[in-house]
Structure formats: C-alpha cells, structure tokens
Image (cartoon, grey):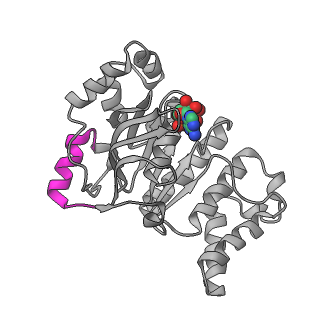
C-alpha cells in the first residue's frame, strides 16, 4: 500500500516547510481517513505521496519505490475536491468519455457504464447535465469517474465536505461497499470528525506533521479524549514539537517499506504494532 518516510514539501523561494518529515502508511483494502485542522497539510501530504507535488523523502506503493506520479498509473486514482467533469456534458456522456480513454471493447464499455452508474446511484440521472447535479450527486459522479480505470486504491480529497448528512452517508456507503465487495482501498481527506467510526485507519496531520496513525479507539486513547470531536482542542494544548516527539517515542519511525495485507476484519487492527504483526504473519501486501 501507499507509504512515505520522512516526506517534506518546501515552498520556494520562501523556504516554508508545509510538510515536515511525514512518515505514514495506509491500510490496504480499508477506508483510511486523513484528518487535521484546516491548513495543517492534509492535501499537501496526499499530493506529495502521489507525486503531484515535489517533495523530499521516500514514497512507496506495494513495496515499490514511487519516484514520479506516472509510477502509480493504473494502480491509484485521485479525486480532487470538485468534479472535473465538464459542466455541459450529461452524466452518461461524462462517464462515456472517460470510459473511451480506458476501455476498448464497446460491449465491455456498456457493462462498465451500467455497473458504475448503479454503484454511484446515478442510474436515474444519466441525462442530467453536470451543471444541474446537486453537490452530493456531483461528488458521486467524481467517484464514478475515478472508478472508470478500476484502480485498486482511490484517493479522495474532501469527498463528503459541505454535504448534508444524508448525502454524506450515501457517499460513505458507496465507499464501504467498494471496500467490502471489491476490496478497494480508499484514502479520504475528511473534515467531519463525527464520521470517523466508518473508517478503519486514521491519520492525524497537525502543522505539517503526521502526529498519529491508528484506529479510532487507539486515537481516542492516545490523545486521552472521550471522542474524536475533542481532538483539535487537545492538539491545540501543546506545541507541534511535543506531538512530534511523542509520535517518535511511540515508534512511528518503524520501517515501512513493506505493508501487510489486511486479513479478517480491519477493525481488529488498532495500531502500527498490529500492522507489523500482520505483516510478519502474512507477508507484504
Ligand atoms: N503552493 C503553496 N505555496 C505556499 N503555501 C502553500 C502552498 N500550498 C499549500 N500551502 C500552504 O500549506 C499549508 C497546508 O495546505 P494544505 O492545502 O495541505 O492544507 P489542508 O490541510 O489540506 O487544509 P484544508 O482542510 O483547508 O483543505 C497551508 O497553510 C497552505 O496555505
Ligand atoms: Mg485540503
């Protein structure tokens, strides 16, 4: 799975370090959440790991080094916050154009189109123009466009932000089904801390540093908070060096070149030590 070690992004010519020595790995065949206050570096982390932003440090995917974004082609896709579909196209046209780029056989194309429309729940809106879609429908179309290439891993930047609770739940349900039925991996930047219980593995970013990775229960225990809604207040109580040192002391710098397969319910894995144990038992993903 996607991992990075000591990853930094420095903006020139100011020399501002907007990502500072990030070490992280994501859980395969699982829903990964990336959280942190606005401006903390979530999008920077993800874009740097995908090779979209220049960075220092190492990135790997399924044990192979990633030097540039082309190394991830066909394995991983990225859905930016807003749909990239052209506003004048209909839902069906947008998906068809994308399928034309990936699938040659027309019969296969038809099957894939139907499957994707069903998955994202837009089968009744095929003739609707992109410009007329609601926010939630637009996000689901964005997901559909990601699914066209059938990647194993999908990265979504704020796929649920700004949506009403029902639309947010619908999108999370689509992601869950894809995890459970197709063993897909999702890495989602999210803002709604109340939805973290849907996710298997949580990455907390604070002031350009990855300060925690683990399950929701492990996160609440690590930060000594009753629930995730208290996280940002707790982070605010200490300077970033405190959180950085705590994570280093907790062993976040463990080698991460190989990442284990998830076997059994992902929820059983609560921290990096569990991931390491699985790796030892089952080999790299
Ligand atoms: N090209 C750039 N030049 C200068 N500063 C940048 C650049 N890109 C990002 N930043 C800054 O780096 C910090 C992290 O930005 P980033 O977009 O990663 O935050 P984020 O955690 O995704 O925030 P949000 O939740 O608001 O999307 C911000 O302070 C941002 O202003
Ligand atoms: Mg962002």
Q: Residue at x 79, y 57 (%)?
A: 130
Camera-side residue of 143 and 78 = 78
Camera-side residue of 221 and 59 = 59
Q: Residue at x 43, y 50 (%)?
A: 49
Camera-side residue of 160 and 72 = 72
Residue 171 in the image: x percent, y percent?
60, 48
Camera-side residue of 245 and 151 = 245
When the figure is inspected, residue 168 is found, relative to residue 97, above or below; the finding is above
Residue 227 in the image: x percent, y percent?
42, 23
The answer to whether residue 191 shows anywhere in this view is no
Q: Residue at x 55, y 49 (%)?
A: 156
When the figure is inspected, residue 112 is found, relative to residue 234, above or below; the finding is below
Look at the image and tell me in which quarter the C terminus lies: bottom left
Q: Magenta includes 282?
A: yes
Q: Main secondary structure of the magenta part?
A: helix
When the figure is inspected, residue 170 is found, relative to residue 123, above or below; the finding is above
Tell me which segment is drawn in magenta. Answer: 269-285
């Amino acid at each position: 799975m996607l991992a990075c070690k000591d990853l930094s992004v420095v903006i020139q010519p100011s020399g501002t370090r907007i990502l500072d020595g990030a070490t992280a790995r994501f859980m395969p065949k699982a829903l990964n959440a990336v959280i942190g206050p606005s401006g903390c570096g979530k999008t920077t982390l993800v874009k740097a790991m995908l090779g979209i932003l220049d960075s220092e440090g190492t990135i790997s995917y399924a044990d192979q080094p990633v030097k540039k974004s082309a190394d991830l082609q066909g394995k991983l896709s990225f859905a930016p916050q807003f749909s990239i579909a052209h506003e004048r196209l209909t839902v069906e046209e947008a998906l068809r154009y994308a399928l034309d780029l990936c699938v040659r056989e027309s019969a296969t194309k038809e099957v894939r189109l139907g499957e994707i429309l069903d998955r994202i729940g837009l089968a009744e809106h095929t003739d609707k123009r992109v410009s007329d879609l609601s926010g939630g429908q637009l996000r689901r179309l964005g997901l559909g466009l990601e699914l066209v290439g059938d990647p194993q891993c999908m990265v979504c930047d704020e796929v649920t932000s700004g949506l009403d609770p029902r639309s947010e739940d619908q999108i999370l349900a689509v992601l869950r089904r894809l995890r459970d039925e197709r063993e897909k991996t999702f890495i989602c930047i999210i803002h709604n801390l109340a939805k973290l219980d849907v996710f298997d593995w949580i990455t907390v970013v604070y002031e350009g540093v990855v300060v925690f990775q683990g399950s929701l229960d492990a996160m609440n225990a690590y930060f000594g908070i009753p629930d995730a809604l208290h996280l940002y207040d707790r982070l605010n109580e200490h300077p970033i060096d405190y959180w950085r040192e705590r994570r280093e002391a907790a062993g976040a710098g463990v080698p991460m070149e190989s990442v284990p397969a998830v076997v059994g319910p992902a929820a059983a894995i609560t921290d990096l030590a569990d991931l390491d144990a699985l790796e030892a038992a089952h080999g790299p993903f």
